[in-house]
Image (cartoon, rainbow, N blue to C red):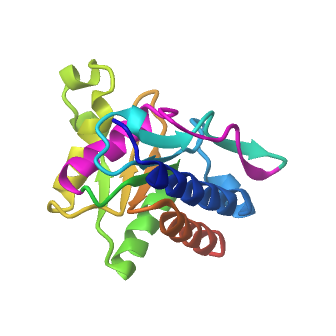
Amino acid sequence: MGIDSDVEIEMYGRMMIALGAIEDCREFAAFIPEVRTNMAYASPGAKTPADVLAIEGRITVVGGMPHAAGRPRFGASGHLARFVLGIMQDHPEIRVAINFSSPPDLIQWLEWYCRQKDWPFAVIDRSEESTGGRNIEGSTMSWKAAEAIRKTGDRAPKIICDRGDFGKEPVSVIVGPEPISTVTELLSIVREYSRR
């Protein structure tokens, strides 16, 4: 799908501002999972991962600080891009997803935090996914998106926690309409949790 150049410029600009905020937040380094963090930002009407801007090489930790391994590029994400595309099928206004680590104590705290904010919250149990679905390349992320929406009563979820599975790391995702506001929400969570 062709993306209007003005839309593309705005998307890159918002992505770079959001990425800069993540890289400036020392506390976020502790929230980067083993699979690393990515931020996926879908273009309006996106249909495939090629329509989704993401960080090439993901976000890792360098010198105790979050650090992007590469720059934003369309098609740089498969998994997280498919997740945000799955959410967009029912909620096209949700165009951003950012993953972060979710140890068990964080999941419980996030549930409390979301209640205070009146944010829809969902916990995904991968053992509930059909065996057939797990064996189809890329289908898990679409299933996770649909399951999150089902668990929030068809509302657009704000935070989705995946408890993980055998060989699968527990990872949470925050979603939103655009990267800057979504990163602001995520970093507020990180700082508040870190101050406990």
Residue in the image at 40% along x and 43% along y: 3
Question: Does residue 103 appear anywhere in the picture?
Answer: no
Q: Nearer the viewer, residue 35 or 92?
A: 92
Corner quadrant of residue 140: top left
Q: Position of residue 188 (x, y in %)?
A: 57, 73
Image quadrant in which the C terminus is located? bottom right
Residue 42 relative to residue 139: left or right: right
Residue 12 relative to residue 27: left or right: left
Residue 142 on the magenta span? no
Image quadrant in which the N terminus is located? top left
Q: Nearer the viewer, residue 189 or 182?
A: 182
Q: Nearer the viewer, residue 104 or 94?
A: 94
Q: Position of residue 14 (x, y in %)?
A: 55, 60
Outermost residue to the front: 5
Residue in the image at 61% along x and 53% along y: 31
Q: Position of residue 57 (x, y in %)?
A: 63, 33
Q: Nearer the viewer, residue 71 or 169?
A: 71
Compared with residue 82, is residue 94 higher up or lower down, i.e. above or below?
below
Residue 13 relative to residue 99: left or right: right
Question: Does residue 187 appear anywhere in the picture?
Answer: yes
Number of callouts: 0
Residue 86 on the magenta span? yes
Residue in the image at 70% along x and 38% along y: 69
Compared with residue 77, is residue 24 higher up or lower down, i.e. above or below?
below
Highlighted range, magenta: 64-91
Outermost residue to the bottom: 116
Corner quadrant of residue 48: top left
Residue in the image at 35% along x and 63% along y: 158
